[in-house]
C-alpha cells in the first residue's frame, strides 16, 4: 500500500476507530462492546450463527499489545483498520471457527485456515467477532432456507432479509458490527444489502481472492463487503483485493484509477429499462445527480436470457463443486448404512436440503452426455452474447444504473418449496448480469419514501472502471440509518 492511501483508509470509520487510534479505547473494549450488543439484540433477528468471542478477544489482546507505545500515526499506518469489528458469512473460512455454509453436511466443520480476505483484514487490525447466517451453500435469496433457521429483516419486517448473505446485511443494518463480508455468485451481497438498507459491493471477478470461500459456482463466486457507506465499502475492498498465489483466477486490479471522463468531464450514466423504470424514478428525485452527469437510457435485450443462462451454468458448477461432500472427507456422515454406495447416498440425502439437491440434479442433467450440447454449451454461448452486448453498452456509457432486484421482493414468510424457489430465480435478473460478465457492481440504499418506493439502486461498471462506479454510487446513496431506534445500536 502507498503511504498516502494508508493515511486515508481509516477515515470513513473514524468515529468508531478514532478512540482506538488515540489510545482511549482498546481493541478488547470494542470486542466486548460488540459481543454484548450481539447477545442483547441478535436473538430477535438471528443474523449470527456463531459468535467467536474467545478468538476475538485473543486477537484484540494481541493487537493491543502490538499497538502499545506506538504513536497514533504509526498505529494508523501499520493497522489501518485497528479496532474495527466485523462479521463473516458462514461460507468463508475463519481459522479455528465452525464454518457450516448453513448446511447440515458441514454442521461440525471447524476450518483449519482462514480465507485470504479474512487474513488481510486481520493483518490490518480488524477483528472478526462471528459468522453470519445465509441460505444453504449460498443458494437462495432470502436467508430463510439454511439449516439453522431464518434471519429476520431488521428494517422491513414483512420482507425477507434477502440472501444469500442476509445475516451479514442484517448485522450491519443493526449496527452490531462495523462491516461484514458476504459472497456474491448471482446477487447474494447486493440483494440482502438492498433489502436491509445498507451498501453491498460485489467486486469484479478476480479482484478478491476466492481462497477460503466455500465454492458454489467458481466462475461467478466472489467475496465482497457489506457496509454502511460507499466510502467504507471501497476502503474494505482496498484491503482485501489484490493478487494471491492461492487463487489462479485473479486479475491485476485497477481500483484506484481515476475515472476517465471522455465527455467534457461528465460521467455518462446508462439507465437500464427506460424512462419508466424504477431506476429512472430514483434519478429524477436527485436533480444534482442529473445535472452533474449525462443521463442516457439504454436497453440490453439479451438480459431476457440472463436468468436461464445463469442457473444452467451455476448449477453445472455447483454439481461438480458439491461432489466433495461425500461423508468421507468433511463433516456429516449418515448412520445405519451397509454399503459404501449407501453411505454416499444417505449422507447426501440427509445432509443437503431439497433445494441444494435440486440444483445438483439440474447441474448433473445439463452436464450429461445427452444434454451437454443443448444445455451447457448453449448457455455458455449465450453468456458470451450477453457479455458482448454489455461491452457494446460500455462503449456508450461509463456506468449502468438499475434497480438492484426485481419485484415482488422476497417475503419474510418465503415458503422454501420448489415453486417459491423457481419464482425467486426471476428476482435475480438484474444482479446476475455482473456475475455472468465478471463486472463490479454495488447496491446502495436510496432515500426512503414509503413502503412502495424502491429501497435501493445498483451501479455496475466495466472491470477496471471501479472509480466511476464508486463515484456515481456515492452520489446516489442515502446516509446510513440504524434499524434499532434507541437501542445500543443506535449510535
Ligand atoms: N440467488 C442466486 C442463487 O440462488 C444467487 C446466489 C448467490 O449470489 N450466492 O443462485
Image (cartoon, rainbow, N blue to C red):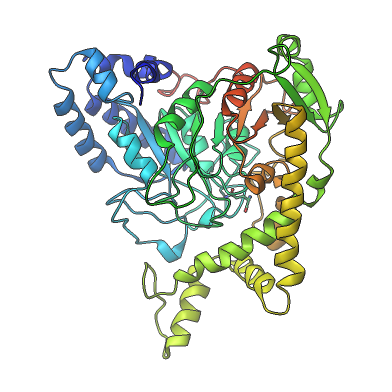
Residue 35, image x, y percentages: 32, 34
Judge left or right: residue 361 versus residue 207: right
Residue 55, image x, y percentages: 24, 42
Question: Is residue 406 among what the camera can see?
Answer: no
Image position of 213 with respect to 469: above or below = below
Looking at the rendered structure, the number of numbered marks drawn on it comes to 0
- Residue at 43% from the left image edge and 40% from the top image edge: 43
Q: Quadrant of residue 200?
A: top right
In the image shown, does 463 or 57 lie closer to the viewer? 463
- Residue at 35% from the left image edge and 26% from the top image edge: 1
Judge left or right: residue 136 versus residue 313: left
Q: Residue furthest bottom?
A: 338
Judge left or right: residue 187 versus residue 120: right
Residue 103, image x, y percentages: 47, 60
- Residue at 42% from the left image edge and 87% from the top image edge: 340
In the image shown, does 375 or 418 lie closer to the viewer? 375
In the image shown, does 484 or 72 lie closer to the viewer? 72
Quadrant the C terminus occupies: top left
Question: Is residue 326 among what the camera can see?
Answer: yes
Q: Residue furthest front?
A: 262
Judge left or right: residue 447 versus residue 246: right
Residue 72, image x, y percentages: 23, 13
Q: Quadrant of residue 209?
A: top left
Q: Quadrant of residue 99?
A: bottom left
Image position of 179 with respect to 145: above or below = above
- Residue at 67% from the left image edge and 21% from the top image edge: 448
Amino acid at each position: 500500500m502507498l503511504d498516502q492511501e494508508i493515511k486515508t483508509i481509516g477515515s470513513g470509520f473514524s468515529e468508531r476507530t478514532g478512540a482506538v487510534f488515540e489510545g482511549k479505547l482498546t481493541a478488547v473494549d470494542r470486542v466486548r462492546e460488540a459481543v454484548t450488543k450481539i447477545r442483547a439484540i441478535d436473538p430477535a433477528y438471528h443474523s449470527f450463527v456463531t459468535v467467536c468471542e474467545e478468538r476475538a478477544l485473543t486477537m484484540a489482546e494481541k493487537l493491543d499489545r502490538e499497538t502499545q507505545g506506538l504513536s497514533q500515526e504509526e498505529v494508523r499506518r501499520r493497522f489501518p483498520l485497528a479496532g474495527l469489528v466485523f462479521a463473516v458469512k458462514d461460507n468463508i473460512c475463519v481459522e479455528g471457527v465452525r464454518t457450516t455454509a448453513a448446511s447440515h453436511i458441514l454442521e461440525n466443520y471447524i476450518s483449519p485456515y482462514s480465507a485470504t480476505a479474512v487474513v488481510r483484514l486481520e493483518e490490518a487490525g480488524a477483528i472478526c467477532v462471528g459468522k453470519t447466517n445465509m441460505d444453504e451453500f449460498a443458494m437462495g435469496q432470502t436467508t430463510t432456507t439454511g439449516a439453522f433457521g431464518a434471519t429476520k429483516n431488521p428494517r422491513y419486517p414483512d420482507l425477507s432479509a434477502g440472501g444469500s448473505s442476509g445475516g451479514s446485511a442484517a448485522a450491519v443494518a443493526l449496527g452490531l458490527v462495523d462491516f461484514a463480508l458476504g459472497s456474491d455468485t448471482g446477487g447474494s451481497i447486493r440483494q440482502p444489502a438492498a433489502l436491509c438498507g445498507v451498501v453491498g459491493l460485489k467486486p469484479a471477478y478476480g479482484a478478491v481472492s476466492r481462497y477460503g470461500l466455500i465454492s458454489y459456482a467458481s466462475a461467478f463466486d466472489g467475496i465482497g463487503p457489506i457496509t454502511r457507506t460507499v466510502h467504507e465499502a471501497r476502503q474494505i475492498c482496498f484491503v482485501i483485493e489484490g493478487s494471491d498465489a492461492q487463487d489462479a483466477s485473479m486479475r491485476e486490479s485497477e481500483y484506484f484509477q481515476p475515472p476517465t471522463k471522455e465527455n467534457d468531464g461528465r460521467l455518462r450514466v446508462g439507465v437500464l429499462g427506460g424512462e419508466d423504470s424504477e431506476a429512472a424514478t430514483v434519478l429524477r428525485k436527485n436533480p444534482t445527480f442529473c445535472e452533474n452527469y449525462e443521463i442516457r437510457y439504454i436497453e440490453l435485450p439479451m438480459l431476457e436470457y440472463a436468468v436461464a443462462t445463469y442457473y444452467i451454468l451455476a448449477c453445472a458448477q455447483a454439481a461438480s463443486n458439491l461432489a466433495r461432500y461425500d461423508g468421507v472427507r468433511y463433516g456429516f456422515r449418515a448412520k445405519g448404512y451397509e454399503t459404501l454406495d449407501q453411505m454416499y447416498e444417505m449422507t447426501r440425502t440427509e445432509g443437503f436440503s431439497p433445494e441444494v439437491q435440486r440444483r445438483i440434479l439440474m447441474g448433473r442433467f445439463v452436464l450429461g452426455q445427452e444434454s451437454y450440447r443443448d444445455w451447457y454449451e448453449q448457455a455458455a454461448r449465450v453468456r458470451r452474447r450477453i457479455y458482448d452486448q454489455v461491452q457494446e453498452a460500455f462503449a456508450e456509457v461509463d456506468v449502468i444504473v438499475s434497480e438492484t432486484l426485481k419485484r415482488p421482493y422476497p417475503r419474510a414468510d418465503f415458503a422454501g418449496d420448489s415453486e417459491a424457489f423457481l419464482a425467486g430465480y426471476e428476482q435475480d435478473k438484474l444482479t446476475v448480469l455482473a456475475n455472468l460478465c465478471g463486472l463490479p457492481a454495488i447496491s446502495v440504499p436510496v432515500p426512503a419514501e414509503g413502503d412502495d418506493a424502491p429501497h435501493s439502486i445498483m451501479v455496475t461498471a466495466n472491470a477496471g472502471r471501479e472509480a466511476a462506479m464508486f463515484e456515481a454510487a456515492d452520489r446516489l446513496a442515502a446516509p446510513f440509518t440504524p434499524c434499532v431506534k434507541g437501542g445500543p445500536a443506535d449510535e
